[in-house]
Image (cartoon, grey):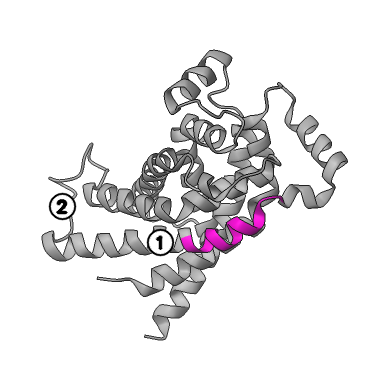
Amino acid sequence: MISTESFVAGFAYGGTTVLVGQPMDTLKTLQQTSASSRSLAGTASELYRTAGLRGFYRGGLPLLIGGGLMRSAQFGVYSSAMATIQSNYGPADPSSQYWFGCVNPQVVAAGFCGGIGRGLVEGPFEMAKVRNQVVSGWRFGDAFQGFGTTMFRNSLLFAGFVIYMDVLKQQLDQRDMKWTPFITAGLCANAAWATIWPLDVVKTRRQSGRYDGRNVLWLLRDALRKGDMYRGMGVGLARSFIANGASMEVYAVVERELKGRI
């Protein structure tokens, strides 16, 4: 079953994420790939000195194009996978089928599908974004560099996001509480990013062109040895909370409007 509304709303989510979060994403990338231990303030100051305000939006164009497509795939595939699972097996029974009493296995499976759908689209656009952010040239043959790492990261990232969203919704429903999409998406996105952050550091370094010839395991061990496993996470989570919170507000409005016309 194809969820057209989720694909369209996901496209709006992706475009909003880039427009709102690109400056902080650029700073995150520069911190993750830098060989120095320069502070966030120092990184921002140096970027402004050398490139001005435009420098903060470096790499934004490929991600603005790809961001809408990848989020469309992410949410569209997730919703379609969930609908297919439930049409074949029915909704999961919370009393007997939930893991640890709160984790819906159907959400986990559909979340992984959504993450893979996003990764299939995102890989080349993300590589181009990272190369532009660190001012490193690239060729067409580099388009799929770090593709496997991006796929693995995304499958865990989006599965984590929808799991946290579902668990939070259960807790709020039990207490007859309701939070805004901005708060729920911002908090759950941050929890998901914090869970997989070392993979993002490795992915960014793999795609930067500054570590040619180094495989994922080498990059992971190198980041661990240097204490860089959570490099750039402060600004990354700030970006995540603001960008995903704002984007979920847009997603909710677009999806509601589309469903209201059917």
Magenta region: which residues?
Answer: 58-69
Is disc 1 placed on a helix, strand or loop? helix
User: Mark 2 and 1 residues: CB-CB less than 8 Å, in contact?
Assistant: no
The residue under the point 60% across, 57% down is 62
The residue under the point 51% across, 51% down is 124
Residue at image mark 2: 93
User: Counting other residues with Cα less than 10 Å from the Cα at mark 1, is it few (<14), some (14-19), or many (20 or more)?
Assistant: many
Viewer-closest of 137 and 18: 137
Distance between mark 2 and mark 1 Cα atoms: 28 Å
Question: Does residue 66 show up magenta in the picture?
Answer: yes
Viewer-closest of 107 and 55: 55
* Image coordinates for residue 134, horizontal then vertical, percent: 68, 39
Whether residue 172 is situated above or below residue 203 in the rendered picture: below
User: Which numbered disc, 2 or 1, marks the residue that appears first in the sequence?
Assistant: 1
* Image coordinates for residue 178, horizontal then vertical, percent: 45, 57
* Image coordinates for residue 139, horizontal then vertical, percent: 58, 47
Q: Toward which corner of the image does residue 76 lie, by quadrant? A: bottom left
Whether residue 115 is situated above or below residue 190 in the rendered picture: below
Q: Is residue 242 visible?
A: yes
For this orientation, the residue located farthest to the top is: 225
The residue under the point 54% across, 51% down is 140
User: Counting other residues with Cα less than 10 Å from the Cα at mark 2, is it few (<14), some (14-19), or many (20 or more)?
Assistant: few
Q: Amino acid at mark 2?
A: Asp
Q: Amino acid at mark 1?
A: Ala
Question: Does residue 104 show up magenta in the picture?
Answer: no
Residue at image mark 1: 73
Quadrant position of the C terminus in the picture:
bottom left
